[in-house]
Image: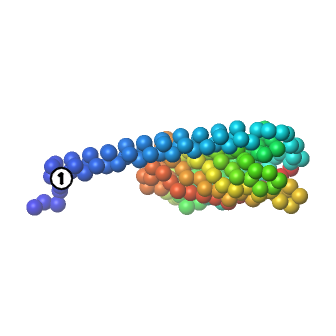
């Protein structure tokens, strides 16, 4: 008996993997659709009344999240309502373990009042680096889409913001950062200065 599997042994395994990948893709599509419906429901639920906070801009430092490891970003608040607001963020990050830089971004709807908010939305990350941190290989790029859900707290007379969130990522284009995960479980924490 040789160490190589026969064709008859190999084909059922291949069909199982293809069926599993199809199931994973269909499941991911269903979860994404439900998440988007929840996101738009939250937006519609909170569009009554205006509130004018004095600080709409933010510079932040994050660990994890769509920045992958360490990142800094600029965020601007839009459509500020009595019970929520829309936040748009863009930034840059570094990935010391795998090498390279990231360009994180997100768009979230924040539902709440006062200084505590539930945050949900979509984000993404463009990663530009190498197969390893030595940078001896050819450069590669990939794009990962993230579903964001978390909590945002504004404190210190509205000068500071703390964000804690889950941000599972799905590889859309290019090689995967870690192995060949369809869905990469992830989360992050961010502290920001509001001005």
182 displayed left or right of 67: left
Residue 103 in view (yes/no) = no
21 displayed left or right of 147: left
Q: Residue at x 47, y 45 (%)?
A: 28
State which quarter of the image contains the N terminus. bottom left
Quarter where residue 186 is shown: bottom right
Q: Residue at x 22, y 49 (%)?
A: 12
- Residue 77 is situated, as x and y percent measured from the top left of the image, at 78, 43
- Residue 94 is situated, as x and y percent measured from the top left of the image, at 63, 55
Colouring style: rainbow
- Residue 191 is situated, as x and y percent measured from the top left of the image, at 75, 59
Residue denoted by label 1: 9
Mark 1, secondary structure of its residue: helix
Q: Residue at x 16, y 48 (%)?
A: 7
Residue 47 in view (yes/no) = yes
Q: Please say if 108 is above or below 99.
A: above
For the residue pair 1 and 30, the one nearer the viewer reads as 30
Farthest residue toward the left? Answer: 1
For the residue pair 42 and 158, the one nearer the viewer reads as 42
Q: How many marks overall? A: 1
Tell me if mark 1 has few (under 14), some (14-19) or many (20+) residues whose alpha carbon lies within 10 angstroms of its own: few
């Amino acid at each position: 008996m040789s160490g190589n599997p026969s064709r008859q042994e190999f084909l059922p395994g291949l069909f199982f993997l293809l069926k599993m990948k199809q199931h994973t893709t269909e499941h991911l599509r269903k979860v994404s659709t439900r998440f988007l419906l929840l996101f738009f429901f939250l937006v519609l639920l909170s569009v009554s009344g205006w509130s004018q906070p004095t600080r709409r801009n933010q510079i932040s430092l994050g660990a994890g999240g769509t920045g992958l490891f360490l990142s800094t970003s600029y965020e601007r608040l839009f459509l500020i309502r009595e019970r929520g607001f829309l936040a748009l963020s863009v930034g840059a990050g570094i990935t010391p373990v795998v090498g390279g830089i990231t360009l994180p971004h997100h768009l979230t709807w924040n539902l709440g009042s006062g200084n505590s908010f539930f945050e949900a939305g979509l984000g993404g990350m463009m990663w530009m680096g190498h197969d390893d941190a030595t940078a001896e290989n050819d450069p590669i790029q990939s794009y990962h889409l993230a579903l964001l859900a978390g909590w945002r707290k504004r404190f210190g007379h509205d000068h500071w913001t703390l964000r804690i969130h889950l941000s599972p990522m799905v590889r859309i284009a290019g090689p995967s950062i870690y192995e060949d995960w369809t869905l990469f479980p992830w989360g992050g924490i961010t502290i920001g200065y509001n001005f």
